[in-house]
Amino acid sequence: MTAPLPQLADNTAPHEILRAGIEAAGGPVSLACSFSLEDVAIIDIAHAAGIPLGVFALDTGRLHEETYEVAEALVERYRLKIDWYFPRHEDVEQLERDKGLFSFRESLENRHECCHIRKVEPLLRALSGLKGWVTGMRREQSVTRSDLKAVENDAANGNILKINPLLDWNERRVMDYAAEHSLPTNRLYKQKYRSIGCAPCTRAIGPWDNVREGRWWWENAENKECGLHQR
């Protein structure tokens, strides 16, 4: 059954989007946290507004050390409980035995295979039993996200609600919020990283580049999704 969507005006504040989305979901809702500035801002916004929000994270086995540091800082600051999900070790072992450690750079098909094993399949387990999930996606980030809605039905995941409270924020606004509230921030941002995923698939970029240019930089812009956010 498709969940009813709340009617939200343009420029609705993030905490109001969260409240409306969680109420519409009518059941457990969690944030999919990659420990980006966006996700940390959402945690802080929910905390400040007294909005109960679960948090889960996908440990792909190839995250940066700096990413784990942010996770620990969030646990300390907010007394946060993070539900960690991991890829099935049998699938990772088989992939690396058959295709080596960097098969994802050889073709789009191989990259999707790696992302499915390390991220998509664990996400399916994380979303099991949820009525909705929250993301830090923003329209400005890429051509694949330009049509985001504040609250939408996620057809790829059983039509649970997908809540995107920062969809209209630009990169500068996210950075200003993080600075104003002294949020835990991944040290890689100071090294010119602007979107941080798995270590082998992420690199620093220039200020003139699109924010996700450093993700899978060998691919075209329309392919820069891992499968977590099918549209």
Image (tube, rainbow, N blue to C red):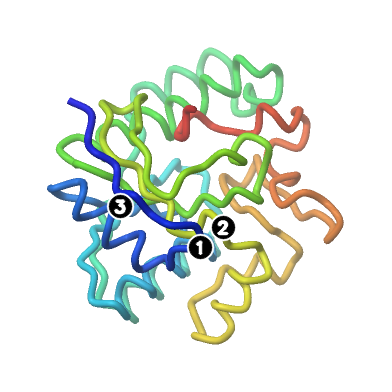
Which disc is residue 56 wearing?
A: 3
Q: Nearer the viewer, residue 93 or 151?
A: 151
Q: Secondary structure at mark 1?
A: loop
Which amino acid, mark 3? Phe
Foreground disc of the pair 2, 3? 2
Looking at the rendered structure, which numbered label has been put on residue 11? 1
Question: Which residue in the protein does label 2 denote?
Answer: 168
Q: Where does the image place residue 149, in percent across and percent down from the top left?
A: 46, 44
Q: Kindly indicate the quadrant of the structure image that contains residue 162.
A: top left
Please give the name of the residue rendered at 69% of the width and 46% of the height, measured from the top-left corner: 212
| Circle 3: element type | strand
Determine crowd level at label 1: few under 14, some 14-19, many 20+ residues with C-alpha closer than 10 A: few
- CB under 8 Å between callouts 2 and 1? yes
Q: Amino acid at mark 1?
A: Asn
Task: Residue at 13% x, 48% y: name it.
Answer: 27
Q: Position of residue 125 (x, y in %)?
A: 25, 34
Q: Is residue 4 left or right of residue 61?
A: left
Q: Are marks 3 and 1 in contact (CB under 8 Å)?
A: no
**Does residue 16 sit above or below 21 in this rendering?**
below
Give the quadrant of residue 190. Answer: bottom right
